[in-house]
Image (spheres, rainbow, N blue to C red):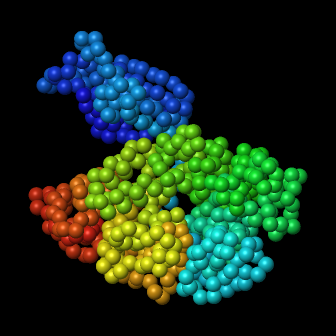
Amino acid sequence: MYFDSRDERCKRPYGAVPYGTEVSLSLFADANEEVARVALVAHGEFADTWDEQELTATPLAGGRTAFRGVYIAPDAGELVWYHFRVIWKDGHEAHFGKNGFKPWEELATWQLTVYDGESKTPDWFGGGVSYQIFPDRFRRGEKRDVAGMVGGRTLHEDWDEMIDYLPDARGEITCSDFFGGDLDGIAEKLPYLRSLGVTTLYLNPIFEAASNHRYDTADYRHIDPLLGTEEDFRALCEKAKALGIRVILDGVFNHTGSNSVYFNAAGFYPDVGAAQSETSPYSSWYHFSHFPDEYDAWWGFKTLPAIEESDPDYINFIIEGEDSVVRHWLRAGASGWRLDVADELPGAFIERIRRVMEEEDPDAYLIGEVWEDGSNKIAYSTRRKYLLGAQTHALMNYPFRNALLDYLMNENAEGFREAMETIRENYPPAAFYGAMNFLGTHDTPRILTVLGYCGEWPHSREERARIALNRGERYRGVRRLKLAALVMFSFPGSPTVYYGDEAGMQGFEDPFNRETYPWDREDTALIAYFARLGKLRNGRASLRRGGIEYLLSDGALLAFRRTLDGEESLTVCNAGDAPAAAKLPWRGETALDALTGERFGAQDGYLNLTLKPLQGMLLIEDDAV
């Protein structure tokens, strides 16, 4: 038996389909298989429907038989799990799935994602280049005093000082040391960001909060005073838009800070918070099992009391009110939201956000933080519907990062191809081409450290704070980082650079991945490389929106082609420690490596390349530049 859901002889159209699509399916049986009948068995998970339809037998040359049929996709968002029931001429039958013939309880079925084809996704994000900024650590434009601000803040005088990473006298990590990076500093460096090809800024939380990461929101209505004011934010957005750059904000709506206007456990704010009185106007936002000291908190962290997202007052405040948080900051200049811990937000809550965003600005973009394949994610025993048309436009692409690291570290090109083809098959096209692709974030170790450090990672915080890559490790790490960036900038989805990765920043996990940007100490050669990739990305339609075809995925060698309207871009990488030969199809007489300017001649429609260890090329038409 043969069926491959990615083979157009077996299934058309490819991948996810809009509501009501006619899906052609063909299962092929060898001549020696005396099959009498084949039935398609399809289960719609959300509607809990079962459909079984017999396929039509069509004789083929060589005695083979094709069993064909047309399945009509549901007229609502759905995950359809399908397989085939095969009945032989002698009367016995079996179920055939992705893992072959297996008992029902062991069968792996194929997935068909059915989405709302009328739902529109703005195209500006996925085609562009994104840059993530941890605001306190990027650039200090104006020196401010932390006196009178929420939390027991300390302010580093020297921008290049070591971050506070040890527990305090009570054994707590408070994240209360600040460096004073602000919105003015970001605005000052907009020309630098534009030189990298950046078209979208994703800012970690900027609202008033007690900690330097600001995921413990204290006041959604106000910019943290150490960052500036709402006027500064509006000015940043205006200056950014003048350079062709949009701003996306971090929406932290699953929890607030315990030291906030709404909870007010420390009594810092004059308003009566939920932790102070059960008659507080914010009491219904939280769930207390014992007032006031026992309450639901994000992953048990008492400084992050969890929100009851179904509370009507909270929904009105964050989403639906005339001057709700979502509406207000879009009107102030933001172009979208990234939803923190989207897995912990109810689907209906996300749908409300999407609907209100479209009311305010149909061009606004909504991204969800999801760490796995978001098309079939189960969170808290519930299958999620992020990508079916009513919730997020796209997701953070952690599967991309994981597969790319596996390729670079373990020479597993086929693993990268398989992981990414699974995502391409499962995601609606707009979500695949609009994904946020990245090498690192504020939640992962610095990519240069990951790719360069040898041996077992140090155990203690003290060790991790003072260890840096040696000369050999850094050389290897930079070579690998260049390969990683090449793949990311030439792959479908928005390449997203975590601040300072382009400058060669190092560091293990939080907080060491959140040090200050090394102004005047950057790796200028690495920055130039990232800028070249950004220019190519913005200048070549095939890299922004072209289809993708894998030409080679074998061990250390990876090659894929992007094409659109006659334009072709071919990425080829050798992640190994030895030279490697690659024979790749090319329609022109010569090809130009857009990264080095080197030219290669084609023979009989093929390029015969020899790649050095840890070398990558981006091949384009010789007359393209």
Which residue occupies 46% across, 27% down? 43
Image quadrant assignment for residue 363: bottom right
Query: Is 231 drawn above or below residue 354 in the view shown?
Result: below
Q: Which quadrant, please, contains the N terminus?
A: top left
Q: Quadrant of residue 85?
A: top left
In this picture, is 296 found above or below 135? above
- Picture layout, residue 122 above or below residue 186: above
**Residue 139 in view here:** yes
Horizontal side of 584 relative to 20 (left or right) equals: left
Quadrant showing the C terminus: bottom left
Is residue 314 at all visible to an observer of this figure?
A: no
Q: Is residue 288 left or right of residue 163?
A: right
Q: Residue furthest left?
A: 604
| Camera-side residue of 184 and 204 | 204
Q: Nearer the viewer, residue 238 or 355?
A: 355
Q: Please give left or right for residue 5 compared with residue 459 in the image.
A: left
Q: Residue 525: percent from the left, percent from the top?
A: 36, 82
Q: Residue at x 62, y 43 (%)?
A: 347
Position in image of residue 455 (x %, y %): 35, 69
